[in-house]
Image (spheres, coloured by chain):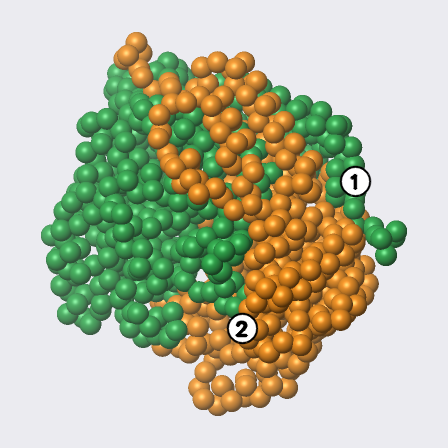
Chain colours: A green, B orange
Amino acid sequence: MQDDFKGTGLDSQDAEAFRVQAHKMLDACLDQLEQAAERPWQAPPEDIDRRYEIQAVERGAEDVVGQITRDVLPFHGGNTHPKFWGWVQGSGLASDLIASMAASVVNANLGGRDHAANRMERAVVDWTRHKMEMPDSASGLLVAGTSQATVIAFQAARVRKLNDVRAKGQGARQLTAYASDGVHNATRKALELLGLGAECLRLVPSLNGQMNPQALRDMLKQDREAGAHPFLLVGTAGSVDIGAFDDLDALADLAAAESLWLHVDGAFGAWTRIAAQPYRALSDGIGRADSIALDFHKWMYVGYDCGMVLIRNEVEHRAAFSARPAYLEGADRGLAGGEPWFTDYGIDLSRGNRALKVWCALETYGEVAFSDAITGNCQLAELMAQEVSAQPLMQMGRDVISNVCVFTARADLAPDAQSALNNEIAQNLQESGEAVFSTTGVNGVTMLRAAITNHRSRPEDIRAAIDAVAREAANVTEIS
Amino acid sequence: MQDDFKGTGLDSQDAEAFRVQAHKMLDACLDQLEQAAERPWQAPPEDIDRRYEIQAVERGAEDVVGQITRDVLPFHGGNTHPKFWGWVQGSGLASDLIASMAASVVNANLGGRDHAANRMERAVVDWTRHKMEMPDSASGLLVAGTSQATVIAFQAARVRKLNDVRAKGQGARQLTAYASDGVHNATRKALELLGLGAECLRLVPSLNGQMNPQALRDMLKQDREAGAHPFLLVGTAGSVDIGAFDDLDALADLAAAESLWLHVDGAFGAWTRIAAQPYRALSDGIGRADSIALDFHKWMYVGYDCGMVLIRNEVEHRAAFSARPAYLEGADRGLAGGEPWFTDYGIDLSRGNRALKVWCALETYGEVAFSDAITGNCQLAELMAQEVSAQPLMQMGRDVISNVCVFTARADLAPDAQSALNNEIAQNLQESGEAVFSTTGVNGVTMLRAAITNHRSRPEDIRAAIDAVAREAANVTEIS
C-alpha cells in the first residue's frame, strides 16, 4: 500500500516556494494596515461573485496570494478606516496579525485537554474577571460575541431557577425576564432560542436611557400576581442606540431583593471599566452581576470575532453546560488531562483560539494604551457634539453619554424630510469614502449616529466628517 | 483638544520595526509547519500559568514575538503531528496561514452589510451545498462547529413544528426527537439548550452501528399513542465512537413518511461525499436531509474553528432566526446594503471570517487533493486494522467502517486489566510523543481508538504506531 498511497497532496510540496508566497502575503497585509486611512470602504465590484466562485482546482499559493491581494484586501467592511463609526464595530489591531499567524499554525482546539492554548484562555479570563471586579469564584469563556455570551448566561440563569430544565425541558412554567426598553436585540434572540419565548421579556420604561427601578418593581409585582416567575434582570452597560448605562448598583440591589439573576449586557460599555473618569463611573457596580457579556472586538479593538461571558459562580456556569460522554473522559495525565475543559462551560466542543489575540494585544500595547483609546473615543463623541451644535441647522438627537453621538443634519425640516436626508447623507458619505455613520430612529426621525469604538480616529477626523455632513446637507437639499 | 488627545497609543509607532517582527513571527510559524513531524504534543511546562499571566504593561512587538516563539508554538495540542489520531481532530493546512493573515487585516464582521467577505462566505456555502447534493433552495452558515450547527438546525426544526415558539416559548407541548444510540452528545446538548430537555431524546437501538428502522417505527408509534409529538430524526454520518453511518436514504424515506425533520450529523463523515468508493457510498442520501451539520476543521483539515449548518429550505432557516431592529435596518445602497445578512440565519450578530480559510484551502490545493487525503485516511484505518490483526495479542473492538479503528492491546486479559492497560498505553505514547490514540468503551472495555482525520499521516506512521503499542503492551504487563 505504501507505494500507491495517494493521500499526500495537501502537504506543501515546495516549502521554500511557499515561504516566499507567505512573506509576500504578509507584506501586502502590512501595507494594508499602514494605509488604513487611505483605504475606506468601497462597494464590492459587480463581478465579485464570479471572482470568488470556487473552482477547487489546484492553483498553488502564488496564484491564491495574488488573488487575495487583488480581490480580497481592498473590499473590506470599512471598519479599519479612521472615520468609520457605523453601528458598533471595532477597528482591529496590528497585534492581531502576529496572533493570527501563531494561532493558525498551532491550530489548537480549545474545547479541552492539556495544552497551553487553554492555559492562555484562562489567563485572559482571569485578567478580564479582575477588570470587571468579579470575584475569584467567577468563570468565563471566550465566545464569538455578546450574542453567544447572552445565550450562555441566560441558560445558566434558567438552570438556577429550574434545576431540572436540562433533563425535563422548559415545560409550562412561565418564567419572565426584564430589561430596559433600550436593550439590545441579542436578549430577545437568546430568549427565543432557549424556548422561553420573546413574550417573556418585559421591557421596562427608561428615563434618560436608564431603566426606571420603580417601574420595574411595579411590573414584578404585577407579573407575580398573575402567576409568572420572574427570573432574570438584564442591565445594559452601553445601549446600542445612544450609549446609555443602567444604574448597575441600583439593579444589583434590586436583583438581590427580588431574587433575580442579574445579567449585564456590556458588549462595548463594559470597557468603560478601564477608562478615565467620568466614563469609568458609568459601569460602577458591574462586578455585582451574576453574569456579564462583553466583546473584545468592539471597544478593545481586537479582531473579529471575540467576546466573553463571565459567570459569577463557576458552579452555576458548569451546572448549565457540563456533559462528558465516554469518548471525552478526562485522564490524570497525557493529553486527556488538563481540567477544567472549556467545553463544560458552553455550547461548543470544538473551539478556535481567541485568547492569543487578546493576550497579544494587552502584552504588546499595555492596558494604559487601551484605557487612553477608550477615554479618547468618548472625548471624540463630545467633540462631535460640539461640532454639531456649532452648525446652525444641525441638532443633537440625544445628549452624549459615552461614545455615541446621534444627530440630525437639518433640524428645521419636517420629520420625514429629515429622515430621508439623513439616510441620503449616510449613504453618500459611505460611498464617497469620507465617513461612515449608521442611522437610528429618535422620536420618529431617522438620525445619523456615530458609535466611536475606533482607535484610529483623531479630532481632525471628527471635524472633517461633520463638515462633510454639512456640505452634503446643503447639496442634497439644494438638489431636491 | 487636538493637542492633548491621548488616544493614540494603539497605532503602530514604528511601522518598519513592526514589519521586521511580523516577518520574524511568520518565519517561526513556517518553521513550525515544516517541522510538524518532529514536534509532537508535549505537556505544558509547570510554570506555564506564570509565563502567560497578563501584565498588560507595554512590551512591544519584539518582546511578544519572542515569547510566542518560545512559549506558545512548542506547546500545541499535538493534532498537527502525523501520528495524532486522538478524538476527531483535524491537522491544519499551510493555506490557513495565508488566509489568517488576510482575514486579520481585513477584520470583517460577517454579520451583514455589503462587503466582500460576506460574498465569499456565500461562495463557500454554495460549493458545500453542491457537494452535499442539497438543492439550490438550501441556505447555510459558517459556525464554530457541529455543536453550533446542531443548535441552529434543531431550532429551525422546532419552528417548523411550533410556528409560534419564538414568541410564545416551548410551553407544555411535548416534542420528541430520535437518534441512534451512537449519536454524538452535541444532539443532547442542543436539546437541553433549546429547552426541549434531554429526556425528549429517544435513543434508537442500532445494529452494527446503524439505526434500526423498525425499532424507530415502533418507538414513534408508541410515543404518538402516549401523546407526544415526534418532530426530529437525527441521522449520523460518521459516529464518533466507531465511524458508523446510518442508512441515510432509509432515514429520509422514513422522515418523509412520518413527517419528521431529518437532520444529519455529518461532523466528519459528511466528507465521505468527496471520497472514492466504497467510502463515498457511506453518505449516500445525505442531500435528502432537511439539515446537515458538518465541520471543515476535522476532515477537511482546515484550521479551528470552522463548521457549517446547511438547511434545505432557506425560508425555514430564516424563519428561525431573522430579526432586525431599527439600528440594523438595511439600505438599498451603501454599507448597509448587501442582503441577505448572515445574522438572519443564526445566533451571532458579530461574526469573524471563516470563509477565507476554506476558500483558500480549496483554491490552493484543489478538491482532488482533499478527496485523496480523505480516501487515504480510510485506507490507513484499514491498514491499522491489518497491523492490529497481525499482532498475536491485539484484537479489533469493531470492524473498520471508515476512518476509525478501535482495538485492544491485549485481548487475553480480563476486561478491567485490558482497560487499565489500554489507558496506560494511550498516556505513555502521548507522553513519549510517538502517537496519540484516544480511548473509548466497547462492551465494557476501554479500548484504544484512532480516528484518522490527518493529512500528514502515512502508512509508515501507522506501522510504527502499532509497533509502539505492542512494545508498550509488553513493557507495561511485564512491570505490573
- The amino acid type of the residue labelled 1 equals Glu
Q: Quadrant of the C terminus of chain B?
A: bottom right
- Pointer 1 and pointer 2 on the same chain: no
| Label 1: which secondary element | loop
Q: Please, which residue is most extreme toward the right here?
A: A3
How far apart are labels 1 and 2 at the CA level? Answer: 40 Å
Residue B9 appearing in the image: yes
Q: Residue furthest top?
A: B3
Mark sitting on residue B232: 2
The three-letter code of the residue at mark 2 reads: Leu
What residue is drawn where x is 33% and y is 40%? A128
Disc nearest the viewer among 1 and 2: 1
Give the class, few, some or many, for how many residues have Cα within 10 Å of label 2's Cα (few <14, many ≥20).
Answer: many
Task: Provide the secondary structure element on which disc 2 rests.
Answer: strand
Residue A204: percent from left, percent from top: 21, 52
Q: Is residue B324 left or right of residue A222?
A: right
Identify the disc placed on residue A255: none
The answer for which chain carries disc 2 is B
